[in-house]
Amino acid sequence: MATFIEAHNNEGNETKIEIDADEVEEGILKQLFYKVEHKKIPQSRYRKLQPIHSINVLLGVIAFSVILIMFGGIFAPDICKNIWNKIDAFAMKYSCLSGKTVGVAIGLGIVGIGITSYLAKIIMSRFHVKELKLPADTTLQASEDAEESVFNKNLDEIMYFFEETQYQLIFFEDLDRLENRKIFVHLRELNNLLNNDDVIKHKPIVFVYAVRDDIFTREDRTKFFDFIIPVVPVVNATNSGEILLEKLDDARRHGIYHDISQGFVLDVAPFISDMRVLQNIYNEFVVYKKTLQTEQHLKLSDEQMMAIIVFKNLYPRDFADIQGEEGIIKKAFQDKNSYIIEKREKWQEKIEYNKELIEKVSEDTLKSIKELKYAMLIAITEGKGVTRNFTDSSYLRRDRGTFAVNVLSDDFDLRRLQEKEYQYTVYISFSGSINDMETDEKELEKYIERWEKLKEYNEKSLEVLQEEIEQIKYEQKKLSSRSLRWLIENDSSENVLSKEVKDNKFLVFLLRRGYLDEKYANYINYFKGNSITTNDMNFILAVKNQESQPFDYQLTKIKQVIQRLQDYEFEQKAIYNFQIIEELLGEEKISKKLEVFVQQLADGEETSWQFIDEFVDKTKYQAKFIQILSTKWNSMWEYISRQNTMTYGRQAHYLKLIIEYVDEKELSLLNVENCITSYFEKHEDILQQLNDVSSNKIIVAISNCDVCFEKLNIANVSADIVEYIFDNCCFKLNDCMVRNVISYKKKNLLNMFENQPYSTIIKLEYQPLTEYVHENMKEYIEAVVLKKTIIEDEKEDIIDLLRRNLEESDLCASVIRLENFEIEKLADCLEQEIQNKRDKVKVVWNTLLEQNKIGISWENTMLYWKYYSISNYLKKFIEVNVDKLSVEKNNYVTDNFAKDIINAKFEDSVLKKLLPVLPMKTFDLDVEQLPENILAIMVECNYFGYTIEYYQSIAERNEDIAVEYIVKNQAEFYNSLEDFPMTKNVLERLLFEQKIPMDNREELFEKYAKTYMTERIALNMNAEGFKVTKTLFDIAWEILSENQKERLMIANLELLNVDDMEKCFGELSGQYSVLSERTKRCKVKLDNTENNRKLVNYLEKIGYITSSWEEKTDSNGQVIIIGCRIKQKR
């Protein structure tokens, strides 16, 4: 006997079922009497239903029938005879039965007895006669089963039981659980009565109680019980594991195979402390295993099955709730879903924030904080000027607050302007005046918000923000597939589970260990055919009501769910479920439902993309999914590539899937507005990102999309791909890509390429590249050659480059300027092209001259002049290289070339060097028409011969040049001196020309001095060393001034006697005039100069004076006055 715990509601409130003493005693009596066969106690009123045997019923019916026939033959013979006649008539009617009346009668009897026996058995087993009413209010009533006696009312029955049976030992179990000690008192009294009954022969009758020790106090326990036997528990929490392991091992020996580990058993055993519970756990495990695994052929975990059976036995009410899709286990997984939703929402907020940040900054025209602050300082004034400072006071205190110069500093936090609540903005208007206005707080707030976003964007960078978004999305996707066990382990049960679930420690233990997981329904349900779970039905209803569920909503019978949904319902976003589309993709043929599903995914909406982004890495049918999606969504890659919040790595992942799984035709359709092409060209490491894709697929993509790489990293890239790109010239001609080709083909030429970008191409001998360069020479020159600092291609290659690119003569000029080279013979450079491309070649040759990159020779000079005459470029070339040209052989020079040179207006310095090496075979130039500077140069270099006519023509133009002409042609001049038209100026120039030998000058002096004496000649004839005669002295004396005469006199003292001296002194003034007084002896004072000392000495020598002395000295003792005494004339 025992009472039980009853759970009244789902909240887990428990009450104990109360049983009073009478009910307990009644139960004891039933157990006693129903234990014994009723034949042993036939007089007992306690009877249990007995099985009705067919043979007994048949014998009874036969006996009743015999008695009934006997009574009919005695008391109603007419009736019996009448019945016999009818049977005989029936037999006679059918010829086959004629004469067989007895047989027919016996057959009818057997049939009747059989039917009656069958009906009697049914009536006896299903109906009881409780009351029989007879006429005249007479009633027969069966004994009452409703009222049962208890010990004090049924003592006779009890005594009768023990008198008739031989039971001496009665066991009572679980009476202690009733917590009603009164029953023990009644049982003890009953035991005494039985043992004192003299009728009962089999004594003693012993009552054995299996109860816990604390049912009575220690004194009452020893008084009540005659003998106490202690019981050692077979099972408790410490050894239940070993016992369960023994049972499981025994099961394996009996053919019940399982994979339950010892670790699992020892893990859950501490929660099992009762042998009966343990035994039931084992029994139920065997049943469940056979039912769920063997019959349904499900691959279920034996450990998880055992775990849920343990939970079932420890918490039966909670287990029962699972069947109704409620209860604590359901709550635990609802907590999981709530936790995931909450976590995803928080992460989504971060994603949206980062997206908004990227979009705001991308859309903002102001890209730097400095620009933004400048704009704010103007905008805050409503465009009236530029903010000077922010202040909290008006006009009287304008010079306080925060100034613009501080705001513009990089480390200034704009939020400080809000915190200080400046009321006024002082600004300098565009007219220069200082004004103030109330601070526009809304405008200020707008700029502060933009500043915050731009500041955060700059601190993190676009790449970091994209990576954050991608990482959060990755965590979101992973979170959806995380088990409850993982969530508890990584974020603790405190954050994941509700209090109601956490209070069940065993359940939390099972969840934490993973013994109970999201597939628990598979371990408690027996699925038949097309049956679906409650979760499945809830999803179907949600779709029909257009209520979206999480993408990873768990379904069990996926096929059945799909069957119950109509095609049109797959056009709703509520259908978005990973398991649904996975099941559809798994079908051999593409169904209408799958097409509708994917068509909806291709609408480019955020929800659709979120589903795609999470599903694409989950599905086993990735290829099929991408193929179908691409056919429905031609702009798929365009959408992906425009996602500025998606990392490069993630975009590359999608490109990898597209290239790997989409066929050529569809790939071309996906290349909307060359979006795939531009993506390839934009990222130099794209081939490394696609390293997992087959080479052929990538080659097809490059070919179909006409990819032309600007930059490309080919490290670790398949040789097939690299060869295809290089062989088919799928790259732009730039330094980077050409380097890649050279490095790949002949790495040893890579250093050469830096200084010889074109010669390297020729030397590489790689035909595809060579032809590509030749066909796109302009592009190659602009993108490669001209990007170098100094280049030194081979001369032959340079000429070839110029020839191939001659149409772009300006580019050729740029190449020439950059190349470090020299063409020895200009004839080797494009001369053959002049006939058809004269102007183009001229540009090239002009540049060669300009850059001085041809051999310095008259041959090259003449060749250029031959085609293009004396251009500015040739003129400049000649001027720069005149020194070298002046020493070059001039075998190629003609008179016409010389004339062009003469008329080309070269600098005099250049002509002086050129004309000597450019003689004219026949000089036929009009000297009178030649510019004086050129004429002078020609004279200087004896460019033409001497004639008096040339002299006269030159003299008319410029006497200086004419004199120089004489000097350069002295021999011819002296040979024709008699006919020479001498003039004073010419004579004077010739006499003092140092280039003329002294003898020739003396000849001229003697011949022409008397006639053509000039002041200069008079003054300098002595200094030049000419022989002066008294006649020449006198001629000279007449043309000189007084001061000049003094000099002439001093210079020619030796020619003068005393009278000559007197005459000269007489024509002079000053101190010399005194010397002319010879009428008496007198003293004369002269300044102490060198000329005077020389004069005094000469006068004293010729007797003009008698004596001389030092007349006066200065403070330093220096003589400053010379005295002399004139000799009197007689």
Image (tube, helix red, strand yellow):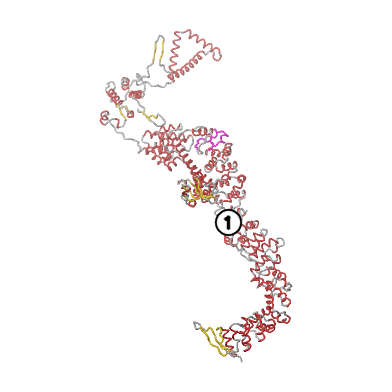
Task: Give x and y (percent) for residue 748.
Answer: 57, 61
Picture layout, residue 448 above or below residue 976: above
Q: Quadrant of residue 788?
A: bottom right
Which kind of residue does numbered mark 1 sit on? Answer: Cys
Picture layout, residue 213 above or below residue 439: above
**Crowd tier of the residue under label 1, counting other residues whose Cα lies within 10 Å: few below 14, some 14–19, many 20 or above:** some
Would you say 160 lies left or right of 778 here?
Answer: left
Task: Give x and y (percent) for residue 489.
Answer: 42, 42
Q: Quadrant of residue 312?
A: top left
Q: Which residue is mark 1?
A: 736
Toward the viewer: 980 or 742?
980
Task: Give x and y (percent) for residue 742.
Answer: 59, 58
Toward the viewer: 506 or 456?
456
Q: Quadrant for the C terminus, please.
A: bottom right
Task: Give x and y (percent) for residue 237.
Answer: 35, 37
Picture layout, residue 17 above or below residue 102: below
Toward the viewer: 1078 or 955?
1078
- SS class of the residue under badge 1? helix
- Residues shaded magenta: 553-576
Picture layout, residue 1119 above or below residue 585: below
Please indicate, yes or no, whether residue 653 appears anywhere in the rendered image. no
Would you say 173 lies left or right of 359 here?
Answer: left
